[in-house]
Amino acid sequence: MVPLEIVLLKKVGSGFRGVIKLLDWYERPDGYLIIMERPELVKDLFDFITEKGALDEETARGFFRQVLEAVRHCYGCGVVHRDIKDENLLVDLRTGELKLIDFGSGALLKDTVYTDFDECQQLIKWCLSLRPSDRPTLEQIFDHQWMHKSEVVKSEDCDIRLRTLDTDVSSTSSSNESL
């Protein structure tokens, strides 16, 4: 099983400058390490606007065009980002180029309704019931089906294969070894 974020980064991260590039990834017994490019002299768009103040119309239009190009690239790769906001856009302070980051909320593009969070919304509404007696217990929350969903993609659904790992916490498997 491979985390969806790695699959998405692998799909969008080549041949286009407006999206952060996945350099490598490692599976560890306690999780995954994702290694991405680290652009120099950048700020996220939120900090950029906070420091510089309101954007002039020409700059705003240029940034918006770059966001549209990044979204078009992602769609062309079969990926939807689902969390585009100023904190997920890096501004190159030398060139003004934007780079879309953080695909942790992303999904594979599909031609049907996205229902990924329906069960979560139902659980939240249940927790926010007006009468305390109508609210779930902690055990009911732990047992709720949404709490048992996984955020990984089966390896047969993508071109990424994992090697079997030792139970030794210090061992890792690199994507270079397993692709």
Image (spheres, rainbow, N blue to C red):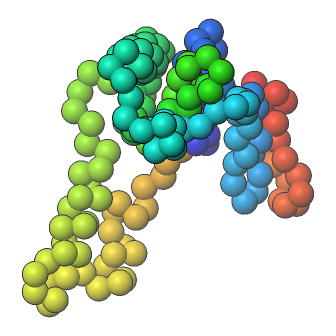
Q: Is residue 37 above or below residue 135?
A: above
Examine the rendered structure and indicate whether residue 40 appears above or below residue 148: above
Left or right of residue 160: residue 179: right
Please provide percent x and percent y for residue 6: 61, 35
Say if 21 sits above or below 141 in the image: above
In the picture provided, is 164 more to the left or to the right than 41? right
Residue 130 coordinates in the image, percent (x, y): 10, 81
Residue 155 appears in the picture as rendered: no
Q: Is residue 153 above or below residue 156?
A: below
Residue at x 48%, y 37% (from the top left corner): 52
Q: Quadrant of residue 84?
A: top left
For residue 69, say whether it is visible: yes
116 left or right of 52 in image: left
What is the quadrant of the N terminus in the image?
A: top right
Percent position of residue 28, x then y? 77, 52
Residue found at the very far bottom of the displayed protein: 133
Which residue: 82% across, 41% down?
173
Q: Residue at x 20, y 62 (%)?
A: 122
| Quarter that holds the C terminus | top right
The foreground one among 16 and 25 is 16
Q: Is residue 20 left or right of residue 134?
A: right
Residue drawn 82% across the image and 27% down it: 176
Measured from the top left, where is residue 96 in percent x and y? 56, 20
Q: Quadrant of residue 78?
A: top left
